[in-house]
Amino acid sequence: MDLPTDPAPTEPAPADLISPELLERLTAGEERAWFEFVQEYEGRMYGYLYRLEGNSEDALDLTQEVFYRAWRSIRTFRAGERVLPWLYQVARNTQIESHRRKQLQRFSLEQAREDVGFEVTSEKRSPVQAAESADAQDRVQRALQQLPPEYREAVVLRFMEDLSYDEIAQIQGVALGTAKSRVFRAKEQLADLLESVADVN
């Protein structure tokens, strides 16, 4: 007699899926639902924008604008999709448009090291993770600001916000290989910038 086989294990659902009921409440503009929504995600948005901007006041202003835009565009959110990639896209657009409005001078781009080959499966420890101690936070932030904007955004999304390469590619509007290359190059440049921090290599 054949023994019953155990069902294949299923992947746990992402934590940032919202129920149809909550989406309906958000779409209807229910104040309580939006209060809870903002409380749940404002820390992630602020952290993301702070690492891109390097300025707490600007990051706070942009975070407020992100949720205002989310409220205005919630009807474009498709049920069953993850919330965070959608919010990161809103935040990215908000930051880009803010820079255009203010006509801020963009950080100069550093020449990527030509002798670094592209290897998606690099075992090199993330310099972001290695330097993520209290006394190195400021140094990490200063190093991030020296990266080209597209590299900085890619490495923040990958190592600090834990997004997949597919999601990064979608947010940045580039091919999957380009997203992987940007993360790899950013990691290599950060390693150079943080070489004096213990355990980076």
Image: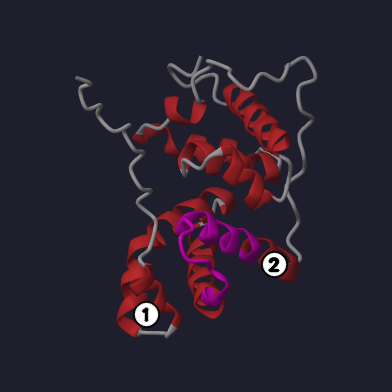
Q: Which residue is mark 1?
A: 25
Please state if 12 lies on the left or on the right of 75 as rendered.
left
Identify residue type, mark 1.
Answer: Arg
The 10 Å Cα crowd at callout 2, few under 14, some 14 to 19, many 20 or more, is few
Task: Please name the residue shown 77% across and 14% down the image.
Answer: 115
Residue 118 in the image, given as x and y percentages of width and height: 71, 20
Residue 6 in the image, given as x and y percentages of width and height: 24, 29
Please state if 113 lies on the left or on the right of 187 as rendered.
right
Q: Secondary structure at mark 1?
A: helix
Mark 1–mark 2 CB contact (< 8 Å): no
Residue 141 appears anywhere in the view: yes
Q: Which residue is mark 2?
A: 97
Front position in the image: 84 or 161: 84
Identify residue type, mark 2.
Answer: Glu
Please state if 75 lies on the left or on the right of 46 as rendered.
right
Color style of the picture: secondary structure
Residue 19 in the image, given as x and y percentages of width and height: 35, 66
Magenta stretch containing residue 78, yes or no? yes
Task: Please name the residue shown 54% across and 25% down the image.
Answer: 194
Query: In the picture shown, does residue 4 fall above or below 121?
Result: below
Magenta stretch containing residue 178, yes or no? no
